[in-house]
Amino acid sequence: MISAGVLCCQGGSDRRFLPHRRYCRARTIPCANASTVLFISRESEISTLRFEAAQEKIQKSELEFIIKSLKVDIEEDRSRAEKSEAYTQQLEEQVESYKTELEEVNGYCEQQAQN
């Protein structure tokens, strides 16, 4: 990986590249080939990082959407469970009411049968 300010001029010496001037600090020799390689390498690295960041952002968005969907599903399930519990309670109360009514009717019928 080529880092910013990498050597660029002839001879492979340790001279640093000045991007705004396109020549090395130690000499005023233009070094178009080396600077082009440097810029292409840096741009390629930056493009790769941008692509990876975009991919991660997309994955994060997808995960956030999945989490939101799951939260909605959980709320819907919870709501259905509460409604089901309420309905079950209502049915149990009706059954108890019918039992009481049936006992009263049976008691009345037995009383009528004895008379």
Image (cartoon, rainbow, N blue to C red):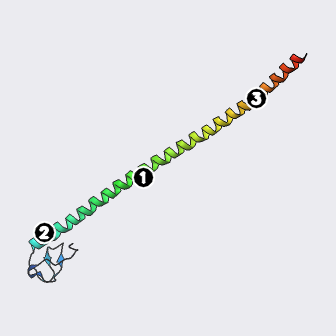
- Residue 42 in the image, given as x and y percentages of width and height: 20, 68
**Quadrant including the N terminus:** bottom left
When the figure is inspected, residue 84 is found, relative to residue 51, above or below; the finding is: above
Q: Which residue corresponds to the image point at 84% horizontal and 23% vertical from the top-left? A: 107
48 left or right of 37 in image? right
Residue at the farthest front position:
114
Which labelled disc corresponds to residue 39? none
Q: Which residue corresponds to the image point at 16% horizontal and 78% vertical from the top-left? A: 7
* Mark sitting earlier along the chain (1/2): 2
User: Does the CB distance between marks 1 and 3 fall below 8 Å?
Assistant: no
- Residue 39 in the image, given as x and y percentages of width and height: 17, 68
Viewer-nearest residue: 4 or 96: 96
Residue at the spot of label 2: 36
Q: Which residue type does callout 3 highlight?
A: Lys
Q: Nearer the viewer, mark 1 or mark 3?
A: 3
Measured in 3D between alpha carbons, the distance from the residue under mark 1 to the one under mark 2, in whole angstroms, is: 41 Å
Label 3: how many Cα within 10 Å (few below 14, some 14–19, many 20+): few
Residue at the spot of label 1: 64
Residue at the spot of label 3: 99
* Mark sitting earlier along the chain (1/3): 1
Viewer-nearest residue: 86 or 109: 109
- Residue 43 in the image, given as x and y percentages of width and height: 20, 65
* Secondary structure found at label 1: helix
- Residue 29 in the image, given as x and y percentages of width and height: 8, 78
* Mark sitting earlier along the chain (3/2): 2
13 left or right of 110 in image? left
